[in-house]
C-alpha cells in the first residue's frame, strides 16, 4: 500500500528530496540496508573515521530538512541519516504502528545494518519519538541520546493545533492557495523559506499523512536505559511545549544530563540559531571524554 496519493506526487516529492540534498553541497554516500520492515535508505556524510551520529528525521517530511540543521557537525562527525520507513523518501513505504515498539525494532535494525556499536543517536521532532522507542526496545544500542524539539514525552495540545495548523492545512488542500499554506506553517516556522514552503505544499498535496504521533514514553519503558541524554525543547514550540517536555523528561529519563530551552525558537529551529544548536550538541557529545 502506497503512502502517496499518486505516482506523480511521489515523483515530485522525491525530486525535491534530491534537490535539497544536492543544495547542501556536501559529499555524501547513499546506501540501502535491510530491516524487518523493508529496505531502508541512508544518506551518509562526514569523515569515514569520525565518531558516528545516527539522525532520525521529522515525520511526514523529507530527511534533508532535518539534516540541514546539522551541517556544522559534518566536518567532525560521520552522520548517518536514514529515511524513516512509511514517511517520504526512498525507504520502504511500510507504515508502522506508533503506539507499539515497532519504530524501536526498525531503529535497531538500522543501527545493526550500519554496523555501528553504541553510536550517538539524535532525533528531531517525530524522530525523537523514534529515538525514545529505541531506548525502550533496545537501550544497549545507544551511546548517547540527543532529543531536539521532541515528540514522545507529551502529546501535542490538539485544540490549538487544529485551529492554528489543521484548518489552514485543510484549506490549502482544497484551494492550493499559497496563503493558506504559509498560514499553516507560521506557527511552526514563523519565517518559512521558499524551500520549506515548497516541500510542505508537496507533502500536503501528495502524501497520505501519518496522523498518529509516537507513543508517550513512560518511566517503566526506560527502566534499562542508561545512556547520557540531552533534551532541547524550543521556547515557542506549539507542537511540543517546552514546559511539558522538560517536566516529563525529568520524570522518565534516569541519566538526563541536561534539559534546556532553545530560546527564541519555534518548532523549526531558525537558521540564525542552528550554529549554537550544533555547538551545544558537540559539547554534549564531547563531555566526559
Image (cartoon, helix red, strand yellow):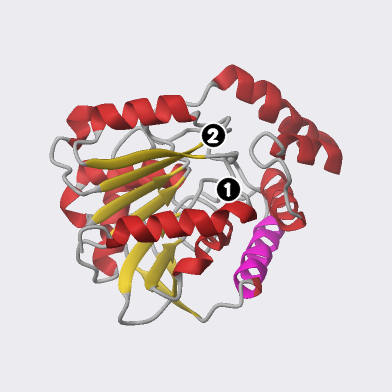
Q: Residue at x 45, y 67 (%)?
A: 73
Local secondary structure at mark 1? loop
Q: Are marks 1 and 2 in contact (CB under 8 Å)?
A: no
Q: Which residue is labeled 2 in the image?
A: 235
Q: Position of residue 112 (x, y in %)?
A: 24, 65
Q: Is residue 90 visible?
A: yes
Q: Is residue 217 visible?
A: no
Read off the magenta span.
7-22
Q: Position of residue 66 (x, y in %)?
A: 53, 56
- Neighbor class of circle 1 (other Cα within 10 Å; few <14, some 14-19, many 20+) is many
Q: Which residue is labeled 1 in the image?
A: 269
Q: As drawn, is 116 to the left or to the right of 192? A: left
- Neighbor class of circle 2 (other Cα within 10 Å; few <14, some 14-19, many 20+) is some
Q: Residue at x 42, y 24 (%)?
A: 244
Local secondary structure at mark 2? loop
> Relative to 74, is 11 above or below?
above
Q: Is residue 12 magenta?
A: yes
Residue at the far left in the pictured view: 224
Q: Residue at x 41, y 30 (%)?
A: 245
> Relative to 248, is 230 above or below?
below
The answer to which image quadrant residue 121 occupies is bottom left
> Relative to 248, is 146 above or below?
below
Q: Is residue 192 magenta?
A: no
> Relative to 131, is 243 above or below?
above
Residue at the far top in the pictured view: 159
Q: Please state which of residues 204 and 180 is positioned toward the viewer in this rendering.
A: 180
Q: Position of residue 186 (x, y in %)?
A: 72, 37
- The Cα–Cα distance between marks 1 and 2, rounded to whole angstroms, is 10 Å
Amino acid at each position: 500500500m502506497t503512502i502517496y496519493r499518486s505516482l506523480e506526487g511521489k515523483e515530485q516529492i522525491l525530486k525535491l528530496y534530491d534537490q535539497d540534498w544536492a543544495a547542501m553541497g556536501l559529499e555524501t554516500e547513499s546506501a540501502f540496508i535491510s530491516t524487518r520492515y523493508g529496505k531502508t535508505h541512508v544518506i551518509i556524510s562526514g569523515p569515514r573515521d569520525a565518531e558516528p551520529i545516527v539522525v532520525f528525521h521529522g515525520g511526514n517530511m523529507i530527511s534533508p530538512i532535518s539534516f540541514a540543521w546539522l551541517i556544522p557537525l559534518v566536518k567532525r562527525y560521520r552522520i548517518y541519516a536514514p529515511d524513516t520507513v512509511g514517511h517520504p523518501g526512498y525507504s520502504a513505504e511500510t507504515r508502522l504502528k506508533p503506539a507499539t515498539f515497532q519504530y524501536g525494532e526498525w531503529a535497531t535494525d538500522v543501527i545493526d545494518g550500519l554496523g555501528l556499536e553504541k553510536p550517538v543517536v539524535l532525533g528531531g521532532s517525530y524522530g525523537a519519538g523514534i529515538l525514545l522507542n529505541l531506548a525502550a526496545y533496545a537501550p544497549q544500542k545507544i551511546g548517547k541520546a540527543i532529543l531536539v524539539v521532541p515528540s514522545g514525552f507529551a502529546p501535542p495540545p490538539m485544540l490549538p493545533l487544529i485551529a492554528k495548523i489543521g484548518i489552514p492545512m485543510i484549506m490549502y488542500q482544497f484551494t492550493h492557495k499559497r496563503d493558506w499554506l504559509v498560514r499553516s506553517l507560521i506557527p511552526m516556522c514563523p519565517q518559512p523559506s521558499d524551500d520549506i514552503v515548497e516541500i510542505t505544499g508537496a507533502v500536503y498535496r501528495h502524501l497520505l499523512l501519518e496522523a498518529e504521533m509516537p507513543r508517550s514514553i513512560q518511566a517503566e519503558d526506560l527502566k534499562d536505559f542508561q545512556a547520557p541524554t540531552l533534551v532541547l525543547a524550543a521556547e515557542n514550540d506549539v507542537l511540543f511545549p517546552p514546559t511539558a517536555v522538560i517536566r516529563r523528561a525529568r520524570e522518565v529519563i534516569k541519566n538526563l544530563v541536561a534539559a534546556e530551552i532553545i530560546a527564541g525558537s519555534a518548532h523549526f529551529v531558525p537558521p540564525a540559531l542552528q550554529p549554537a544548536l550544533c555547538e551545544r550538541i558537540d559539547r554534549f557529545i564531547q563531555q566526559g571524554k
